[in-house]
Image (cartoon, rainbow, N blue to C red):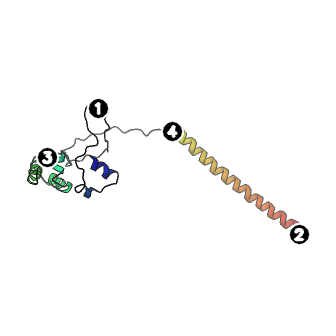
Amino acid sequence: SLQWELIRQGRMKPEEVYMNEPRNVITRSLGPEPVVKVDIEGPYTVLEGDRYILCSDGLTCHLKDEEIGMIARYLEPSDACRLMINLANLRGGSDNISVIVVRVGELPDVNLPQEKAPEPEPELELERDYREWFWLAGVWVASLMVAAGIVMWILTRFDRGS
């Protein structure tokens, strides 16, 4: 939605969502267009007991995120759905209200194959070699300057003594 985009861009705070208009403005959707821009976030770790909620704006117009989260956390998914829909209807139910709550059950033990670390790219090695040579050249030049300084100091002392 437009409000979600504004929050993500830092142009609006989450607590301002309920006060700002226009609401229910969708910026992207699945439809007849051949190419669709999809938001991809994650990956997220899925743990046993996690809850996922899919709902329409008919629910989020009447319940705050904190309320939805608390209800989904403490009730069984079917009871949570029923309560959220009933609460939204009691608070006005001005739009269609749809909600699905899914609880992650026991996860199977899956041993994924360990991926071998990729070989470093040749450009990175060349860059590292270049930095090492640059450092060595700097030490060499500094040593020459110190040696030249010592020679100059000795020559000036020798000239004064004669």
Query: Which of disc 4 and disc 2 is earlier in sequence?
Result: 4
Q: Earlier in the sequence, mark 3 or mark 2?
A: 3
**Residue ID for mark 3:** 95
Q: Which quarter of the rendering shows the C terminus?
A: bottom right
For the residue marked with disc 3, what is the amino acid?
Answer: Asp
Type of the residue with mark 2: Gly
Cα gap from disc 2 to disc 4, whole angstroms: 61 Å
The residue at the point 88 percent across, 69 percent down is 161
Question: Can you identify the residue that label 1 sits on?
Answer: 33
Which mark's residue is nearer the viewer, 3 or 4? 3
Frontmost residue, 2 versus 14: 2
Q: Earlier in the sequence, mark 4 or mark 1?
A: 1
Closest to the camera, between mark 4 and mark 1, is: 1
Q: Quadrant of residue 106?
A: top left
Q: Measure how far apart labels 3 and 1 are at the Cα level.
A: 26 Å
Quote the CA–CA distance across marks 2 and 1.
93 Å
Q: Nearer the viewer, mark 2 or mark 1?
A: 1
> In the image, is 10 to the left or to the right of 48?
right
The residue beneath circle 4 is: 121
Query: What is the x, y in percent for residue 145?
Result: 73, 57
Q: Which mark is residue 161?
A: 2
Q: Are marks 4 and 1 in contact (CB under 8 Å)?
A: no
Task: Tell me the SS state at disc 2.
Answer: helix
Q: Quadrant of residue 158?
A: bottom right
Residue extending farthest right: 162
Question: Earlier along the polypeptide chain: callout 3 or callout 1?
Answer: 1
Which residue does the image show at 29% across and 57% down from the upper left?
13
- What amino acid is found at the position of numbered circle 1 in the picture? Glu
